[in-house]
Image (cartoon, rainbow, N blue to C red):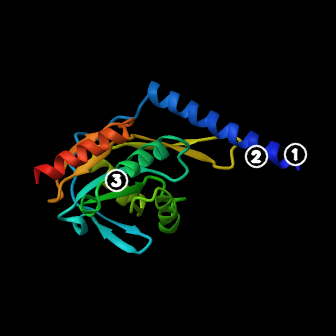
Amino acid sequence: MRKPILALLLLLAAAIAAAVIGWMQWNKNPPALSGPPLGGDFTLTAAHGPVTLHDFRGKWVLLYFGYTFCPDICPTNLGNLAVAWRQLPPQAQKQVQILFVSVDPQRDTPQRLQQYADYFGANIIGLTGSKKEIDRIVRNYGAVYRMVPVKDSAMGYLVDHSAFTYLIDPQGRLITQLPHGTTVDQFKQVIQQHLKEE
């Protein structure tokens, strides 16, 4: 009984160490940004079928790029976003949509993405597509990501990625980007401020 637990702990420690090393390498040598974020419409696939940004005209959209195997950054950002959304009045919640776009299409199926998104309990929609489709959207929003091989790990690789949350207005225009580490209160304040300005 102890051997499987020990093996699991060692695997977990290796994954955490790989994530830390990957993050240190990212800080030393970050990939070049693709340019100023322009935003724009896109079509990807959710568990229930095709989804376009245009589907959410009339709502404020919070867009985040990440992946379900992410050990720390994605759960932190999505968790803060979800708590902020849940703290909004019901009428305000109906005016806000959170989209989670995977930068790991090889492992993140639409079904896996939706299971992951549902964990946060904030009506988040998980989206994926081909690498070509995702790369185009990443480029348009000025985001960046890269695969980092991890030796002696069942995961095989991690994905280093930028961690901005993009705020898109009800007309589908990119308004601003919020950095990693944006708190629940800050997310809530930004959302409420823009809802009042409508």
Of mark 3 and mark 1, the one earlier in the sequence is 1
- The label on residue 8 is 2
Of mark 2 and mark 1, the one earlier in the sequence is 1
Q: Residue furthest top?
A: 28
Residue lying at 47% horizontally and 41% vertically, measured from the top left = 73
Residue lying at 46% horizontally and 42% vertically, measured from the top left = 76
Q: Crowdedness of circle 1 by 10 Å Cα count: few (<14), some, many (20+)? A: few
The mark lying in front, picked from 3 and 1, is 3
Distance, label 2 to label 1, CA atoms, is 10 Å
Q: Crowdedness of circle 3 by 10 Å Cα count: few (<14), some, many (20+)? A: many
Residue 5 percent location from the top left of the image: 81, 46
Residue 35 percent location from the top left of the image: 25, 39
Check disc 1 and report the residue beneath it.
2
Of mark 3 and mark 2, the one earlier in the sequence is 2
Q: Please state which amino acid type lies under the numbered disc 3.
A: Trp
Compared across the picture, whether 136 is left or right of 171 comes to: right
Residue lying at 75% horizontally and 39% vertically, measured from the top left = 10
Q: Please state which amino acid type lies under the numbered disc 2.
A: Leu
Q: Residue furthest front?
A: 89
Distance, label 3 to label 2, CA atoms, is 34 Å
Q: Please state which amino acid type lies under the numbered disc 1.
A: Arg
Residue 50 against residue 59 in the figure, above or below: below
Check disc 3 and report the residue beneath it.
85
Distance, label 3 to label 1, CA atoms, is 42 Å
Q: Tell how many labels.
A: 3
The mark lying in front, picked from 3 and 2, is 3
Q: Crowdedness of circle 2 by 10 Å Cα count: few (<14), some, many (20+)? A: few
Q: Are marks 3 and 1 in contact (CB under 8 Å)?
A: no
Residue 166 percent location from the top left of the image: 28, 47
